[in-house]
Amino acid sequence: MKKILLYTDTPQIGGAELQMLLLAKFLDKEKFTPLFACSKYPALDKWCEKFEKEGIKVIRMNVKHKHDIRHYFQLKKIIKTEQIDILHAHVWNPASCRFALKIKKIPILTTEHDPFKLGTVKNLFKKSTLKNIKKIVTVSENNKKILEALYPLHKEKIQIIHNGIDTSWWKSQLLRLADEDYSEIKRSVFHANKDTLIICTIAELHERKGHKYLIEAIEKLIKNFPNIKLVLIGEGPERKNLETLIEKLELKRNIILIGRQKEIPKLLKSSDIFCLPSRREAFGLVNAEAMITGLPVVASEAGGIPEIVKNEVTGYLVEKENSDALAEALKKLIISPEKRAQMGQAGKKRVLEEFDAKVMAQKYEDLYDKISKKS
């Protein structure tokens, strides 16, 4: 049985970190023993508890920040003490893996969740590290292209493994809901009538998510479709600017911001259309979460989104930063309940086949076996 050390230097929780948890959860425990190593930042405490609930050993590292040299010394101790067979790194600081190569001749692979151009010093470390790393995983075709452009000498090492969602959990949450639950959510959370058509989005309120283009699209639509409502789920630095825009366009009746929410499956299932108008997006897995609930999706052609949303099959893809295109795509779904149902079912099927976390874990298992044999 091979011991896999999932290691990260992250100081916070985001989509990449949740993927690490799903990978550890769904790895075949008869073939692999996952262990997890991260810092002692308080922000990671609840995340670590979730690993422990899955029976996965968690090792907290006493470091102050992601550039702390103690990452190396403590990683060295963990690898030797726990007799690790493979190091699977999800890191911000490439120096950590560079030092790890000196610890023990074990295979190392990295997952690049959101690659970007580094500064001169970090880039030198990364180029040096990549010479000895066995495999580089990207979560989308778009990310793969970025990495190939940044590090053309390592094209042959790059492999795509899409992120996934825990479809079993999503289905269990949806089974607990009845029709009256959806009506209650529309009334008490969305502040809408039962016949109001709900368009929702879930994203940090940040300029890169393109909320303003969606708000402008709603303004274009309400002239002919006054009984629609846009629900913005999430929080962030753009909130005040978005509220100002909503007021300026006199859309307070048709748009509501409800902040961060916990019961996302209920909120999605109580909606009619999901829209993600991102200007920049690493992968956009929230689209898959909407699709598993049976929602058709309208999204921008940003980052890895086109690898999730199949245009004119599970929804519509539009040019980013284009409110006219968003309005036109949304209109097609607003006027056709049949198309919403058809695309919603196609989307659900696609997620179950392509974006289940179990599928993701199986692909990593195959990769672990492959790099072990080459060592």
Image (cartoon, grey):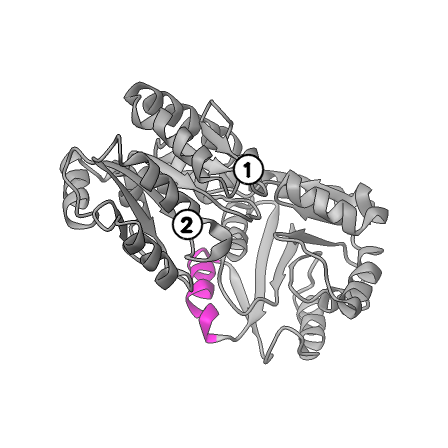
Query: Is residue 96 one of those drawn in magenta?
Result: no
Q: Is residue 350 above or below residue 180?
A: above
Left/right of residue 375 with respect to residue 1 in the rendered view: right
Provide the residue designation for mark 2. Answer: 212
Q: Earlier in the sequence, mark 2 or mark 1?
A: 2
Q: Marks 2/1: CA distance?
A: 16 Å
Residue 134 appearing in the image: no
Amino acid, disc 1: Glu
Q: Position of residue 24 (x, y in %)?
A: 54, 52
Foreground pick, 130 / 206 = 206
Splitting the image into 4 quarters, where does residue 87 fall? bottom right
**Dominant SS type (magenta):** helix
Pick the front one: 357 or 321? 321
Query: Label 1, on which residue?
Result: 301
* In the foreground, 100 or 17: 17
Left or right: residue 106 versus residue 48 is right
Along the line of sight, the residue nearer the viewer: 72 or 247: 247
Secondary element at image label 1? loop
| Dot label at residue 77 | none
Residue depicted at 43% across the width and 56% down the height? 204
Disc 2 marks which amino acid? Lys
Q: Position of residue 152 (x, y in %)?
A: 83, 47
Give the residue drawn at x 49%, y 58%.
14
**Residue 290 quadrant:** top left
Magenta segment, which residues? Answer: 42-55
Q: Position of residue 346 (x, y in %)?
A: 42, 24
Of circles 2 and 1, which is in front? 2
Where is residue 362? Give x, y as percent. Answer: 59, 39
Q: Residue at x 19, y 45 (%)?
A: 185
